[in-house]
Amino acid sequence: MSTPLLGEMSPAEAESVYFNEYPPPKALPRHEALARAFIDLHVEAHRRVVLVTSGGTTVPLEAQTVRFIDNFSAGTRGATSAEYFLEQGYAVIFLHRQYSLLPYSRHYSHSTNCFLDFMDEAPASADSSNPGHGPIMVRDEYQDQMRSVLRKYRYAKQNNRLLLLPFTTVSEYMFELRSIAKLMRPLGPDALFYLAAAVSDFFIPRSRMAEHKIQSSELPPHMRGSAISSDEIYTGENEEKASSNSRKLVINLDPVPKFLHQLVDGWAPEGSMVVSFKLETDPSLLVYKARTALQRYSHHLVIGNLLSTRKWEVVFITPDEPHERWLRVPKSRRSKSISGVEDQVGLAEAKKGNPSTSEEAK
Ligand code: PAZ
């Protein structure tokens, strides 16, 4: 009899099997200590705390990972939303894909927007004692915008409002999410979960994962040993290719268990709010899939978006009236901001019901 897939088990069984199969990430104890101290501080101050997840997760093909499957997410939604939450007085735990965009620094770290382009050498002064070694300055045209970003960044940092915790793989993400959600319990209704990360739907279970780099060409028999991965990852030699000494890689992925159920019904504090995101590429599926997720997990809000329009258009799917509400950034505000990073639908503004942001027609 074949072993049941995690998706075929009860949520509690799937949780136990999944988390027993993987070693916890090395950074987890350190992240837990940081999160605990951060949460304690804000519980004491009666401040609301949001866990924002952001960026994509990787799916390693080998335990000693050389290759992995990744996705498109740059972390723009998460990093931008975190700034809005900070402005609204929340403390933010920013659980993000390592090296994806971060709140505030995102304005200057985009790959098409090198931070060096914002700078210049100050003009040499006549009485300079060290000609050719004047200070580096922010260019005049960027002063105002950079001052404003810098002030907000410093405020968040100096007042301990922002905790940055990185992950890379899908299993690291799951471990971190579970631990932080449980640590947030003392916050009760002051906790908010804002799950914007693009989490892989498929993965290779640890038991079927090759330990070493998957080999693309046949090794001599005496060298095979553990370098040959299990059949599920690396199956079927193609005869023509075999004769040219190369192999076909067949990847067999299992569905990642849907832990949103566990988050809503177990890990998260009583009375907390859970917001999840749903990404699609086919417009005819978006609302249906978002509604189905809301019904399945009984949380508070699903924000749907399409890959191609996600920067200026989202749909809120709620259990209560109006059930479906589209928010659009007006065309006039879709141009690139001064730093070259496009603004996104600002959810904090949407929550305040700011009509200029929330519902202007396209
Ligand atoms: O990171 P980004 O700004 O490029 O994209 C944001 C997003 C599309 C990943 C996010 O809005 C989202 O929909 N996250 C959930 C994806 C999903 O699991 O369906």
Image: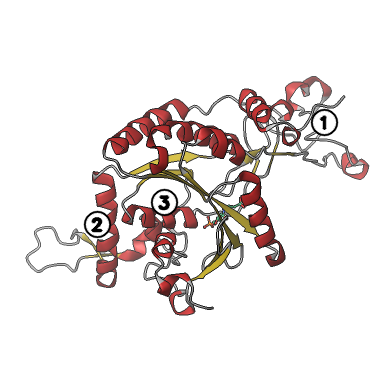
Q: Residue at x 29, y 41 (%)?
A: 46
Task: State if disc 2 and disc 3 touch (CB < 8 Å).
Answer: no
Q: Residue 28 at x, y = what percent? A: 47, 29
In which quadrant of the rendered image does the C terminus lie? bottom right
Residue at horizontal 71 percent and vertical 30 percent from the top? 209
Q: Residue at x 28, y 46 (%)?
A: 157
Q: Residue 359 at what x, y percent from top left? A: 49, 73
Q: Do callouts 1 and 2 mark residues in contact (Cβ within 8 Å)?
A: no
Q: Residues within 10 Å of mark 2 (few under 14, many from 20)?
A: few
Of labels 3 and 2, earlier in sequence is 3
Query: Residue 171, relative to residue 21: is it above or below?
Result: below
For the N terminus, the image quarter is: top right
Q: Which residue in the protein does label 3 denote?
A: 102
Q: Is residue 22 above or below residue 44?
A: above
Q: Which mark is residue 151?
A: 2
Residue that badge 1 annotates? 231
Q: Residues within 10 Å of mark 1 (few under 14, many from 20)?
A: some
Asked whether 166 or 248 is in front, the reply is 166
